[in-house]
Image (cartoon, helix red, strand yellow):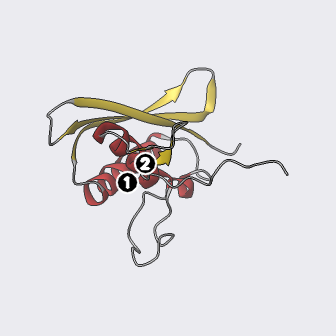
Amino acid sequence: MPTRDPIGWPLLPLPDDTGRLAWPSLEQSLAQQIQVILRTRPGEQLMRPTFGAGLEEFLHEPNTLTTQRRIRDRILESLRAGERRIQVEDVAVLEVPDAPQRLRVEITYRVRRTGSVRRTGLTLDFES
């Protein structure tokens, strides 16, 4: 019978080839949690009705400056409420050249514990 890879859960360790558990570093944990916040709809997590940015809500709206500003504001609000280990320095919502149905979101943040500045992002595809 073929074996399947174990189902992973964000932020939890998985055994390596030697069977040891490797916990994510602080930076890895933060990057994972930011992605979870950005990709979660409010109300999707049990007992956390306001957790998440709910960015898919914007995918049916026109790609305008107003929509871009609302996305930026939602990301700032969600990260400030959902991830206290960082200080958000900047959220840039950028148009993708030659792809009017796409937006690139770039987030710059400072890790409170270490003071290091990190970046992460994602691309949103709007329906035509």
Q: What residue type is labelled 2?
A: Ile
**Could you tell me the amino acid type at mark 1?**
Arg
Q: Where is residue 26 in the image (x, y as percent from the top left)?
A: 28, 41
Q: Which residue is drawn at 37% across and 42% down?
A: 24
Residue beneath disc 2: 71
Q: In this view, does 6 lie to the left or right of 103?
A: right
Per the model, the C-alpha gap separating discs 1 and 2 is 5 Å
* Front residue of 16 and 99: 16
Residue found farthest to the front:
18
Q: In this view, does 38 lie above or below 31?
A: below
Residue 50 picture location, percent across and down: 38, 70
Tag of residue 74: 1
Q: Residue at x 61, y 55 (%)?
A: 7
**In the rendered image, which quarter is residue 78 located in?**
bottom left
Image point (63%, 43%), residue name: 126
Asked whether, in this view, residue 112 is left or right of residue 102, the answer is: left
